[in-house]
Amino acid sequence: MKSLAELEAIRQKMASNVSMRKDDHATRVVIGMATCGIAAGARPVMSAFIEEIGKRNLEHVSVVQTGCIGVCRLEPIVEIVNPDGEKVTYVKMTPEKARQVVAEHLVNGRPINEYTIGAAE
């Protein structure tokens, strides 16, 4: 970092990422970020969700972190929770799968069944 302008640009970028987490009436993208999730690659998955949601300017979608979701062997795990409480649990996520989930599930309303916990079990 070489200038205050560069620092301000970083601050604004991070503030926009945090704002994705504040809408109480939003569809929530909940990413398991316990040690097991992080070890399995949850950080790049979370980054892919944040980038893709931002790129598509999706409103009323928040990205939040949680601890262990409970099935460590299927990490990284991501739950998509609609405002009405309906939940879809995606397992063994990758950044590429995350981008596909944004396009199909969040934009078009079609969950990708082959990535869900039901398909994995």
Image: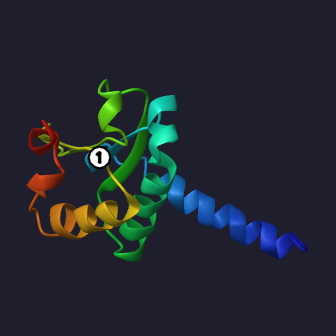
Q: Nearer the viewer, residue 93 or 106?
A: 93
Q: Nearer the viewer, residue 10 or 65?
A: 65
Residue at the disc numbered 1:
28
Query: Residue at position x 75%, y 68% from top?
Result: 8
Task: Specify whether 56 is left or right of 118.
Answer: right
Q: Is residue 7 visible?
A: yes
Q: Is residue 59 visible?
A: no
Query: Residue at position x 34%, y 75% from top?
Result: 56
Number of other residues with Cα within 10 Å of mark 1, as a class: few under 14, some 14 to 19, many 20 or more: many
Query: Residue at position x 17%, y 67% from top?
Result: 104
Q: Is residue 28 above or below residue 106?
A: above
Question: Can you name the residue that lies furthest to the right here?
Answer: 2
**Position in image of residue 35 (x %, y %):** 52, 30
Task: Specify whether 88 is left or right of 46.
Answer: left
Quadrant of residue 87 within the rendered picture: top left
The C terminus: image quadrant: top left
Q: How is the image coloured?
A: rainbow
Q: Nearer the viewer, residue 113 or 73?
A: 73
Task: Specify whether 93 is left or right of 40.
Answer: left
Q: How many marks?
A: 1
**Position in image of residue 15 (x %, y %):** 59, 58
Circle 1 SS class:
strand
Query: Residue at position x 69%, y 62% from top?
Result: 11
**Position in image of residue 17 (x %, y %):** 52, 58
Q: Label 1 sits on what residue type? A: Arg
**Position in image of residue 63 (x %, y %):** 39, 50
The N terminus: image quadrant: bottom right
Q: Is residue 15 above or below residue 64?
A: below
